[in-house]
């Protein structure tokens, strides 16, 4: 299966997103700042990027905002590294934006270290002039050589 970023030109279902450069830069910056907050293990800073209804979907299921932030606050979940290895793919549809990138990170949970290479998709909504994430979805990346 091809990576969706490999298709030449606009996606087959419509014209290329017409995101203005300022909105694109704002969302790209928010994603970078959110990653920095996660590496700082600062629950208050992390929460500032999330809508109240935020959830993360991963191979282990769905985790809501309060549960995720409680893990960070308690120190049970920490991150020591998080880096984008692809530029973010940002598409804005009115007051909704979808941001996808390949991310590597190092986390510790319950005393165990986890190194991850993942594709992440974050769905943001604009409310009151601010972009907040409502959904994060992570999928383990497959190396170019295959599984």
Image: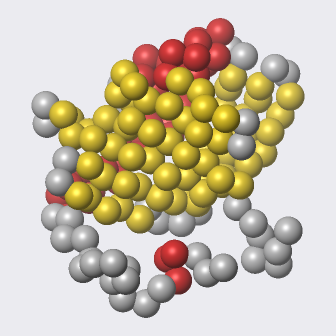
| Residue 63 drawn at (x, y percent) | 59, 27
Give the residue furthest to the top: 74
Measured from the top left, where is residue 109 in percent x and y?
77, 25
The image quadrant that residue 76 belongs to is: top right
Horizontal relation, residue 40 to residue 12: left or right: right
Q: Residue at x 16, y 64 (%)?
A: 20
Please, is residue 106 above or below residue 75 in the view?
Answer: below
Is residue 39 visible in the rendered image? The answer is no
Marker count (numbered): 0
Name of the residue lying farthest toward the front: 13
Is 72 placed above or below 4 here? above
Q: Can you name the residue that lies furthest to the bottom here?
A: 8
| Residue 61 in the figure: left or right of residue 5 | right
Q: Position of residue 8 (x, y in %)?
A: 43, 90
Q: Quadrant of the N terminus?
A: bottom right
Residue at the image position 80 percent from the left and 39 percent from the top: 114
The image quarter in which residue 84 lies: bottom right
**Residue shown at the point (81%, 20%) measured from the top left:** 110
45 left or right of 10 in image: right
Quadrant containing the C terminus in the rendered view: bottom right
Front residue of 89/134: it is 134
- Figure colour scheme: secondary structure
Q: Is residue 74 visible?
A: yes
Tell me residue 61's x, y (percent): 67, 35
Apparent side of residue 1 relative to residue 17 in the rendered image (left or right): right
Q: Nearer the viewer, residue 103 or 95?
A: 95
Vertical placement of residue 81 versus 120, above or below:
above
Q: Residue at 49% of width from left, 37% of height from top?
A: 36
């Amino acid at each position: 299966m091809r990576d969706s970023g490999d298709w030449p030109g606009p996606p087959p279902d419509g014209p290329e997103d017409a995101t203005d450069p300022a909105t694109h830069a704002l969302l790209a910056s928010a994603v970078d700042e959110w990653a920095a907050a996660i590496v700082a293990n600062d629950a208050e800073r992390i929460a500032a990027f999330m809508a109240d209804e935020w959830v993360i979907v991963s191979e282990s299921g769905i985790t809501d905002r309060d549960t995720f932030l409680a893990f960070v606050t308690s120190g049970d979940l920490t991150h020591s590294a998080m880096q984008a290895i692809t530029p973010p793919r940002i598409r804005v549809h009115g007051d909704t934006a979808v941001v996808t990138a390949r991310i590597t990170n190092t986390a510790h949970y319950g005393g165990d270290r986890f190194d991850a290479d993942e594709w992440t998709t974050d769905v943001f909504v604009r409310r009151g002039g601010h972009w907040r994430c409502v959904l994060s979805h992570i999928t383990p990346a497959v190396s170019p050589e295959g599984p």
